[in-house]
Image: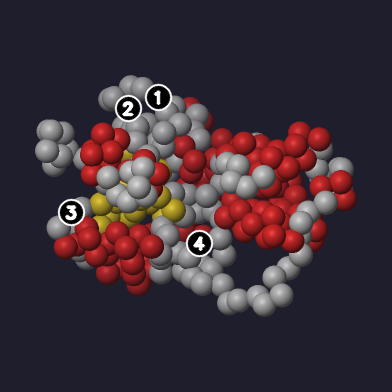
Amino acid sequence: RLPFGPNVAITFDDGYLDTYTWAYPILRKYNVPATVFTATAHVGSTQPFWWQALASLLERARAAGLDCARLPPNLFPSPLVRLLRRALRHPAPLTPLTDYLKSLSPSHRGHILSALQEHVRKSPTPQEAPRLFLSWDEMKEMSRHGITFGSHSHTHSVLTDLPDDELSRELTTSKALIHDHLGFEPSAFSYPDGWADERVRIHVIRAGYQYAVQTSRAISADPLDIYAIPRRMVKEGHARSCFGGFSESLFLAEL
């Protein structure tokens, strides 16, 4: 309970390992419940989401250089090249570029990332990739101590772009895996990137989820719609003072 009144529900998306290493010990210390929405295809994985892989590629490109003129024009039309050049001007935000890539099909986006990978010089001393996501065993431990797990789809796809059969698989596969590994049926669903429409909402209901949450990309302002519960995204920069440290007053103001 916040000092000024209303209750707060704490949620985490994606199922990153740092939820276990950093957040979970604090939540357990203060006996604070929370919900983690996990993308089940990534459980225990060292493979980043595509936007993380893109960020790493651009970081290497800034160091080694990237000749955008040499990129294949069939995959890199002028609008994409402009966004890419803008993103290479560090520390330009990646949001315009990632929003453009999210509008493409997964296969098309994959071809673009593969082509970009070929044109960016590899690191001379490749290191073993660290594990990025929670394991089932870690989730079992957390679930015994006040942490609830919900679904964030199976592969974290943009659900509004999927045909009905793929959309259904994203919802039911994730639900079944959580049941099989953690021993309960998840009641909650979190829309990946907040993208949803009425068709997606109907599929979520049919899959047996009891409620669903949005991100800051609100699809509904109806406070009684339990399949479009709004959330407020709180990131590190929202609570950082001008001196670089944590500011409690800024954090409370954001909440």
Q: Could you give the CA–CA distance between mark 1 and mark 3, rounded to whole angstroms?
A: 28 Å
User: Which image quarter holds the C terminus?
Assistant: top left
Mark in the foreground, 2 or 3? 3
The amino acid at mark 4 is His
Sort mark 2 into few (<14), some (14-19) or many (20+) by Cα contacts within 10 Å.
Answer: few
Helix, strand or loop at disc 4?
helix
Q: Residue at x 57, y 55 (%)?
A: 52
Where residue 172 appears, x then y in whole percent? 46, 50
Foreground residue among 136 and 231: 231
| Colouring mode (rainbow / by chain / secondary structure / one colour) | secondary structure
Helix, strand or loop at disc 3?
loop
Name the residue beneath numbered marker 4: 42
Q: Residue 14: give its label.
A: none
Answer yes or no: is residue 145 visible: yes
Name the residue beneath numbered marker 3: 32
Disc with the residue nearer the chain's start (1 vs 3): 3
The amino acid at mark 1 is Ser
Mark in the foreground, 2 or 4? 4
124 is higher (above) or lower (below) than 78: below
Disc with the residue nearer the chain's start (1 vs 2): 1
Foreground residue among 113 and 184: 113
Name the residue beneath numbered marker 2: 225
Horizontally, residue 130 falls left or right of residue 180, namely: right
Horizontally, residue 5 falls left or right of residue 49, namely: left
Where residue 148 appears, x then y in whole percent? 27, 55
Foreground residue among 185 and 155: 155
Sort mark 1 into few (<14), some (14-19) or many (20+) by Cα contacts within 10 Å.
Answer: some
Name the residue beneath numbered marker 1: 220
